[in-house]
Amino acid sequence: MGVDFIQFSLTPILIGVLASVACALPGNFLILRQQALLGDAVSHVVFPGIVMGFLVSGTVSATPMVMGAISAAIIAVVCIEIIKRFGRIDPGAAMGITFSSLFASGVIALEQSDTTTVHLDVEHALMGNLESLIWYEANGWHSLIEPASLAQLPHELNRLALVCIIILVLLFIFWRPLKISTFDEYFARTTGLPTITISLCLTMISTISAVTAFDAVGCIIVIAMFICPPATARLITNRLYFQVWWSVGFASLSAVLGYILAGYGPLWLGVENSVSAAGMIATISGFILGLACLFGQYRARTNCS
């Protein structure tokens, strides 16, 4: 039983947790800046960029995917401005048109490309391939201290761990300017803080988180984790420091419970087939948010410090 868990469940659970945390950390500041939909937008915009990075490079590699995602984000900004200025329509409508069109173009491009040699198709783009990220070389708990076995861990685990560490380090270094510019942008400008640069860097970090998580968990978890754990934490506490750590806890809990319920929940109910881990993780995160909306201590307050 232990060997089976380590081989087939340990790494997918860890990858799900890391992907959720990587999205939840910047998601806290997107929520407080009233830019929650930016997480949704990023997940839609980076998709065609990731597809183009794959088509150009021919491989599912982090560097071309990040470059493609950044290029897609720039194209999206330009398209939104063109639609707003020449179409004279609401900015929200311009964003909706741009994001949906780019996402649809990515789906079409992916459907017409040859993805037989890699785990990249429309289904994986939406739901990810979390269940397939297993550790074949593990043969017991002692594999966790064997260099040869550790070298065969799924590369998504190492990549997401690195991104989480980088985000945590950046938050520690730039905590004060990021906090000030989030709660009072006008005061931040008067003190000389580069608020525009801070906003751009936050968007960049969100994009990197989305791209890194995308390969393993798809768009569904990325969208849910940018919003649900930070929003849940916001309803639990009115202190930013505690909110960030609460969001990490809720993201981790959603990932663990979601994966377990996706694999074993149907069996407990007498159903033979399991369900999508990504879909269940997103469902659990939404369920926890619903509970916080009903019972959260600060559900009726709007100020945070």
Image (cartoon, rainbow, N blue to C red):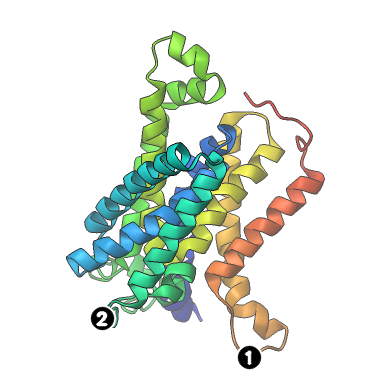
| Image-based side of 111 in relation to 181, left or right | left
Tell me residue 29's x, y (percent).
52, 35
Name the residue type under label 1: Glu
Instruction: Check disc 1 and report its element: helix, strand or loop.
Output: loop
Q: Is residue 165 visible?
A: no
The residue located at (45%, 65%) in the rendering is 217
Picture quadrant of residue 262: bottom right
Q: CA distance from mark 2 to mark 1?
A: 29 Å
Q: Which residue is located at x 31 percent, y 68 percent?
A: 153
In the displayed structure image, the side of residue 57 where residue 263 appears, left or right: right
- Looking at the image, the residue that sits furthest to the top is 190
**300 on left or right of 108:** right
Query: Where is residue 28 drawn, in percent x and y?
Result: 54, 39
Front residue (pair 60, 167)? 60
Task: Examine the rendered structure and indicate whether residue 15 appears above or below residue 4.
Answer: above
Packing grade of label 2 (10 A; few <14, some 14-19, many >=20) is few
Residue at 61% x, 50% y: name it.
228
Q: Nearer the viewer, mark 2 or mark 1?
A: 2
- Residue 255 appears in view: yes
Residue highlighted by disc 2: 117
Q: Could you say which quadrant of the image residue 68 lies in? A: bottom left
The image shows residue 49 at horizontal and vertical percentages of 32, 57
Circle 2: element type: loop
> Disc 2 residue type?
Thr
Q: Which quadrant is the C terminus positioned in?
A: top right
- Labels 2 and 1: the sequence-earlier one: 2
Q: Which residue is mark 1?
A: 272
Q: Pointers 2 and 1 in contact (CB under 8 A)?
A: no
Q: Residue at x 48, y 76 (%)?
A: 5
Q: Is the residue marked by circle 1 packed among few (<14), some (14-19), or many (20+) residues within 10 Å?
A: few
In this view, 198 is above or below 297: above
